[in-house]
Image (tube, rainbow, N blue to C red):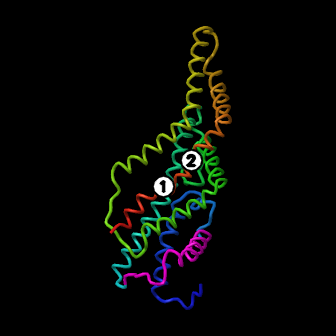
């Protein structure tokens, strides 16, 4: 594409495309992690927007010429980009929530460090699950799926079409339910093993009163917890792969409504 020969309307369309793509890269994990410099994110966002421009904004696209209309379109593009990034963030958050609960049961509630993906305090188990999710995300080409999801939103909600739409409440609650179920599927095997460990320690304490269960129990729960973490890694990877694979189908009803007249 010859950038110097483009009309002002195409430059305006390029800016709107960049608003959607750039916002997604700020909100979405991996793309927007602290390990990625802001300059690199801006450069990558500009590159992706430039590649998508001929497809998502053909030459006949109509862009508002007045300031208020153009700023309204830009705000809409930012909202859609944030929606894409937020859906990806929710998938990572479900795994982080499962890791937080497991960490509490294993006794790691005080051992918190900074999570580089979310820039928040996280336990060691949170970090472990975040790394697993990142590896799965990259292994199954999740970054490609996210970019395809963004491109799909341009088909359903073009930059020259605006619709008045609020997502149905059941759709929002459905997303929350799926996130909760995903976290439950991940955490339940480990939590069950830790609960059985507590029951076994209680029975030992009743049988051998001289034994200091508090001294023996903590290392035992940590050992059982780590053993279950290792055993359940393939299952966690499978659950996360399915969640990332459903990304486009999750975004479709939201984007379709935003583009409806």
Predominant SS along the magenta part: helix
Decide which of 194, 181 is in the foreground and name it: 181
Q: Position of residue 14 (x, y in %)?
A: 50, 79
The kind of secondary structure element at disc 2 is: helix
Decide which of 237, 230 is in the foreground and name it: 237
In the picture shown, does residue 98 fall above or below 209? below
Q: Give the residue at mark 1.
A: 249
Q: Residues within 10 Å of mark 1 (few under 14, many from 20)?
A: few
Task: Please identify the quarter of the rendering in which residue 129 is found.
Answer: top right
* Cα–Cα gap, marks 2 and 1: 12 Å
In the picture shown, does residue 147 fall above or below 214? below
Q: Residues within 10 Å of mark 2 (few under 14, many from 20)?
A: few
Q: Quadrant of the N terminus?
A: bottom right
The residue depicted at 62 percent of the width and 70 percent of the height is 40
Read off the magenta span: 39-64
Q: Give the residue at mark 2.
A: 242
């Amino acid at each position: 594409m010859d950038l110097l020969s483009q009309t002002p309307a195409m430059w305006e369309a390029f800016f709107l495309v960049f608003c959607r793509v750039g916002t997604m890269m700020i909100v979405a994990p991996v793309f927007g992690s602290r390990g990625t410099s802001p300059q690199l994110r801006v450069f990558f966002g500009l590159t992706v927007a430039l590649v998508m421009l001929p497809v998502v904004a053909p030459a006949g696209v109509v862009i508002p010429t007045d300031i208020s209309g153009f700023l309204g379109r830009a705000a809409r593009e930012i909202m859609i980009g944030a929606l894409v990034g937020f859906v990806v963030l929710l998938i990572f958050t479900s795994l982080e929530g499962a890791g937080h609960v497991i960490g509490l049961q294993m006794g790691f509630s005080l051992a918190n460090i900074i999570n580089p993906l979310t820039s928040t305090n996280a336990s060691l188990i949170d970090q472990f699950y975040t790394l697993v999710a990142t590896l799965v995300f990259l292994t199954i080409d999740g970054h490609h799926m996210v970019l395809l999801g963004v491109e799909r939103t341009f088909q359903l909600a073009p930059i020259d079409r605006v619709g008045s739409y609020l997502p149905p409440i059941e759709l929002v609650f459905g997303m929350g339910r799926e996130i909760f179920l995903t976290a439950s599927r991940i955490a339940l095997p480990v939590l069950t093993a830790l609960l059985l460990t507590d029951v076994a320690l209680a029975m030992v304490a009743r049988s051998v009163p001289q034994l200091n269960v508090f001294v023996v129990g903590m290392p035992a729960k940590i050992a059982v917890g780590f053993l279950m973490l290792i055993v359940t890694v393939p299952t966690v990877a499978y659950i996360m792969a399915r969640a990332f694979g459903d990304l486009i189908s999750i975004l479709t009803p939201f984007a379709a409504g935003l583009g409806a007249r």
